[in-house]
Image: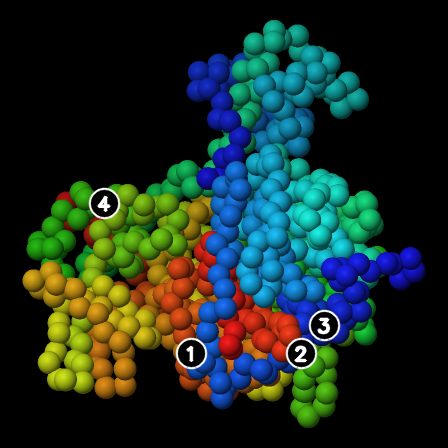
Amino acid sequence: MTGFSLSAQGLDPAHLLKPPTDTWPTYNGDYSGRRFSPLARINSSNVTAMTLAWEYRLDAGSGTLTSAIKSTPLEVNGVLYFTLPDHAWAVDARTGRQLWHYQWESHGGIHIGSRGFGMYGSWLYFETPDNYLISLNAKDGSERWHVEIADVKQEYFSTPAPIVVRNHIIVGVGGDSLDVPGFLESRDPETGQLQWRWNTTPRKGEAGTESWPNPEAMEHGGGMTWVPGTYDPELNLYYLGTGNPNPVMAGQGRKGDNLWTCSIVALNPDTGKLAWYFQASPHDTHDWDAAETPVLIDGEVEGHPRKLLAQSSRNGYFFVLDRTNGKNILSKPFIDINWSKGLDTKGQPIGNPEKEPKPDGTLVTPALTGAANWPSPSYDPETGLFYVNALSSYSIYYLTDTADKPEGYGGRDSGVYSTMALKAIDYRTGQVRWTHEYNRGGPSIGILTTAGKLLFTGDPSGNFIVYDPSNGKILWHAHLVSNVSNGPMTYELDGHQYVVVGAGDTLYGFTLL
Amino acid sequence: MLISRAVPDAAAVERGQKIFVGNCGFCHGTTAQGGDSGPDLVRSPLALDDERGDKIGPVIEQGRPGKGMPAFHLPADQIQDIAAFLRSRQQAAIDRNAYSILDVVTGDREKGREYFNGAGRCRSCHSPTGDLAGIAKKYDAVTLQSRFLYPRTRSSDTQLNRSDAQSIHSQVTVTPASGQPFSGTLEYLDDFNVALRDPAGEYHSFSRDAHVKVEVHDPLAAHAELLKKYTDADMHNLLAYLVTLK
């Protein structure tokens, strides 16, 4: 990386490959998506003394707050950087004091959430509901440039945190309302110009077209790229879960598996070329994006070391794949499901046509919001367990557009029931080793595990809780202003470990004094 | 809010529909979703980009000679009405919360009655002439379908149940270490604390320490259990029976 000069505040690119404990340089803390920190200053023997260091309540300046804090902050050189739709902040990581606030003048789009920043040297990158990629100067939050990545008038809206791999700013898009094609892009860090675009659905003449009935269906096929992916630097593969096909609930105009929607895909980050895919929900009609974090596990299969990838997927399946080639190792439901007839020879689920949306309704579990969703799971290499806040839930799915060529969603759902449980899954067998049941449901919640033998997460009643990851025993808790709304993160500065979590409009920093 | 752009004036939409059907429907279909020789205009990027005819106007006036679309010499106000009509068709596709549910009463009413009195064990708590008398007058069929599956309104619901705000409370008995039990309506429960309101309306809150006993009676537990057991046929039949309870 020649000619790269590093300011005192900027991110050293080497830290993306091996983050030191004073740095959380990317959405998941590192490229693996495990959300496991080697920090152990706060640990099982002293966590009862963990206490509040600071709070920061979001100040939107002259704007309005349209969502809870869903962004996982970055922490680089003592400063936390995080976003909300149209807004961005820098806050002192030791004191919670605001350093700067940036506000974007919106042209529309759904303002459901923003997952945060990517960072390259002294520059920050985030996406807006009206589909702009914006680059800010980390020192003072001033805007360097903005580029449009999708058209808000076609009902695209963008939520992911960009992921930086070498000189690639990898950005995704969202928007299921009007059957537009999904894609992933790599942008130049200096100018924002396009380097490559990968289309989630094929174009005429490409491989994968046999899974669609005609080009019109493919080009309106959806497959949004909602959630940041993970990256293996040795294999040089970027892993991503793609969204569901469009029209979301009316599948009659798109018969076929609908590649590469609802898939875990591996892309070359320098070219955007597809290396392999595994489809979590062929021909999905339930809005079950397979966008959940594809967590990289360096594990074992039958006693031999293997490079693996695991996903607690929205459709209720826990998938384990070989991440070198996409071969299925394991596919096992982690909640009760009623929509699958079993697995095909590739380990992919076979959907039961009886449970596709019907004009008079069909009762399906999980509900539309899924067994898991965008909030981050965690893998703890010391316990060998994969943790997810799982929803057991039901929706009635109605087909409202019975035309041969439906448009829009083509259907509606009514969520009738949901309940949450924190589950610890053994990646080798898919068995749930322990469960902590809650007495209500709600949106799923992000998780962090650490070498201090601790698991940090929230419950659906507004508590921030620390568990023993080996057995689910509760070690510490505090009741916050609102449910935990992002993924907890951690860093160490001057020998002090901080755990930072967002709940509603407030960012909390906990530590040992 | 799924619609973020201005909703066109209803009178303009109505005029626009007539003009569109008369001039454009032959190729583009009467609902603008595409026809034999004209493309879909609902998901068309140009038509979505249009504001009051600024993008579609030139196409209408010049046609698309290479693609077989003739020129139409329409006055500006008629073009704006067409634009309003197209925008309303687009917004109808986008606004999924306003989609109409089709006929949901498709089951067998007699089988529904048998399920109610038999396998569903609904009779343990409910009576068609008692608490459920007139239930089908109180709720439309779609709402009734969601409510009999699970009667509590939840904030994560889609808008189907928004009008129905009644909530059903669990009862709880808390016996602290001192031994004197407190009973009432459950107001709050998590792993750490429990709170209730007693029959006199007084609020009592407790830490859930080791020796504190908490017994919750959830009147909706049977509904949650049944969710695992219903077939779709059971669900349709039960609804067909319940809609007769007027």
Spot occupied by residue A411 in the image (x, y as percentages of width and height): 46, 46
Left or right: residue A368 compared with residue A414: right
Tell me the CA gap for discs 2 and 1.
28 Å
Left or right: residue A16 compared with residue B86: right
The disc, 2 or 1, on the residue closer to the chain's N-terminal end is: 2
Badge number at residue A297:
2
Badge number at residue A476:
1
Chain of the residue under the numbered disc 1 shown in the image: A
Is disc 1 on the same chain as disc 4? no
- Which kind of residue does numbered mark 3 sit on? Pro
| Residue at screen point 17% across, 68% down | B204
| Residue at screen point 48% across, 26% down | B7
In front of the other: label 2 or label 3? 3
Left or right: residue B150 compared with residue A348: left
Query: What residue sits right under mark 3 in the picture?
Result: A19
Is disc 3 on the same chain as disc 4? no
Is disc 3 on the same chain as disc 2? yes
Label 1: state its secondary structure.
Answer: strand
Q: Quadrant of the N terminus of chain A?
A: bottom right
Query: What residue sits right under mark 4 in the picture?
Result: B139
In this orientation, does residue A40 appear? yes
Mark 4 closeness class: few <14, some 14–19, many ≥20 residues within 10 Å: some
In this orientation, does residue A210 appear? no
In front of the other: label 2 or label 1? 1
Chain of the residue under the numbered disc 4 shown in the image: B
Spot occupied by residue A101 in the image (x, y as percentages of width and height): 60, 47
Label 3: state its secondary structure.
Answer: loop
Tell me the CA gap for discs 4 and 3.
57 Å
| Residue at screen point 67% across, 91% down | A302
- Which kind of residue does numbered mark 1 sit on? Trp
Classify A279 as above or below B138.
Answer: below
